[in-house]
Image (cartoon, rainbow, N blue to C red):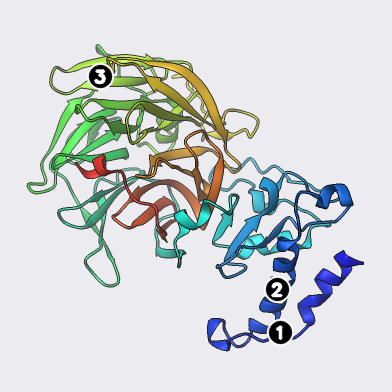
Amino acid sequence: MWFFDLFTRVFIFHWINPSQVHASIWLSRVASQQALLQDENRPNVNNHEAGIVTPLAGPCASYEFPDVICIREYGSRIQGDFERKVRNVLGDSDTYGSTVMPHEPSFDHVSNASFLVFDQQIAPTILGTSPSVDFMFKIEDVSHEGPLYVPETNELYFSRLQRHYLPQLVVDLNADPPALSERLADPPIYAGAGARYHKGLIYYVTISGHENLQGHHFRPGLYTLNITSGKSEALLNNYYGYYFNGADDLDIDSNGIVWFTDNTSTSDYGRPCHVNTQAPQINVGTYRFDPSTGYVSLVEDTLTEPNGVAFSPDQRTLYLTDTGAGEAIISPHISPAPSITLNSTKQRTVYAYDVSPDRLSLRNKRPIYYAMDYVPDGIKVSKEGYIVTATGHGVDVLTGDGRPLVRALTNFTVINMAFTGDEVWAVGKGGVARIRWDLRAPEAEWS
């Protein structure tokens, strides 16, 4: 009877200040929110033992529902039968919100949410008072990668991974609204999959491989771009004569050492669209590169497809993502290579490693998070020490040990994101979004 009464209250009139919500929807929204809030105030500890049905999704105190939705007990108990139909489509896979739950009508609101909250105590410190997810630009329906913020010019750079597309895309954050334009490096930086800003230079890792494109040759590796002169320079373009497969992402430690991943999925992503015409030659791996000496060393080779890279704020921990659920054809005899296939049963994991005291190696590998959606692609770490990772139609915020706290939802597949002062900008397949909340970049992000 109580469960039936909860959902009939949606139609009961409750007073509220009409200026807080749109006049056409405030009545039903407030009624449902008050009903769910009443449920939220009931003791959760004994609900299961007492046979009381607690809605899986409900309002969060101090936030508007359903823009911000709290997921009870990490969604661990779904009432009645349910089904999440697997959709192994690259860039458009199934989502947590696509789960069909006939006996959890509250979960229907998830499709209209901007944020999902898994920890109600910590969430306010992440979301702040007025969080928002804004769709800023519709762009080509191809992958976009390597976003980074340049503080001197207050601009966001990112790359388009498309055949013969050589410029970088630049968002001018000084304009109101922000303006999107193209900018071409000299020589061009082709298909920059990962980027970081360090001491006045943009450091790019690239997946491009082409013998002759507009008078230039391109190989996967590590490059820098001087934003003042527009000049680029190669720092690393081979491993003792071998081509790298597809240098995917990077981070730079306080000593200026570059740690980057090299995988086959980016190489074979490039081959079908001719971003990379060369089949893989070496195993996948994570590398440590010292620009002062030119020495590059392998520090990790156990992941299926090493992808995102990020240090913790104290730089004692390195986080890597494994996107092995994206399976590539690596045979040089198959050309053009077919597109990557997605297999949801394979690796979709964030790993943590301890950095050795001499900062030469990694140890104590441990899985800390298996992505709830798609794969964990790009990864960053906030000043507070929270992991921020792109996972399909959204961005997950995790504790340092991988526990989900908040998920920001988008209407496109997010591949990577960057802090821009007091915001996070997410880029991906077909879109650019701005996330406003209270997370901040670590102090070393733009050093």
Q: Distance between the residues labelled 3 and 2?
A: 61 Å
Q: In this view, does 138 lie above or below 165?
A: below
Q: Which residue is denoted by mark 1 in the rendering? A: 14
Whichever of labels 3 and 1 marks the residue nearer the N terminus, that label is 1
Q: Which residue is drawn at 64% across and 61% down?
A: 111
Mark-to-mark CA distance, 1 and 2: 8 Å
Q: Which residue is drawn at 53% across and 51% down?
A: 406
The quadrant the N terminus occupies is bottom right
Residue in front for this viewpoint, 437 or 52: 52
Q: Which labelled disc corresponds to residue 71? A: none
- Element assignment for label 2: helix
Image quarter (top left, top right, bottom left or bottom right) of the C terminus: top left
Query: Disc 3 residue type?
Result: Asn
Q: In this view, does 367 lie above or below 3?
A: above
x, y percentage for residue 16? 62, 85
Q: In this view, does 216 lie to the left or right of 11?
A: left
- 266 versus 135 height, above or below: above
Residue 49 visible, this orientation: yes
Q: Where is residue 355 in the image (x, y as percent from the top left)?
A: 36, 20
Residue in the picture at 44% in, 61% down: 128
The three-letter code of the residue at mark 1 reads His
Residue 258 in picture, x, y percent from top left: 25, 27
User: The residue tagged with tag 3: helix, strand or loop?
Assistant: loop
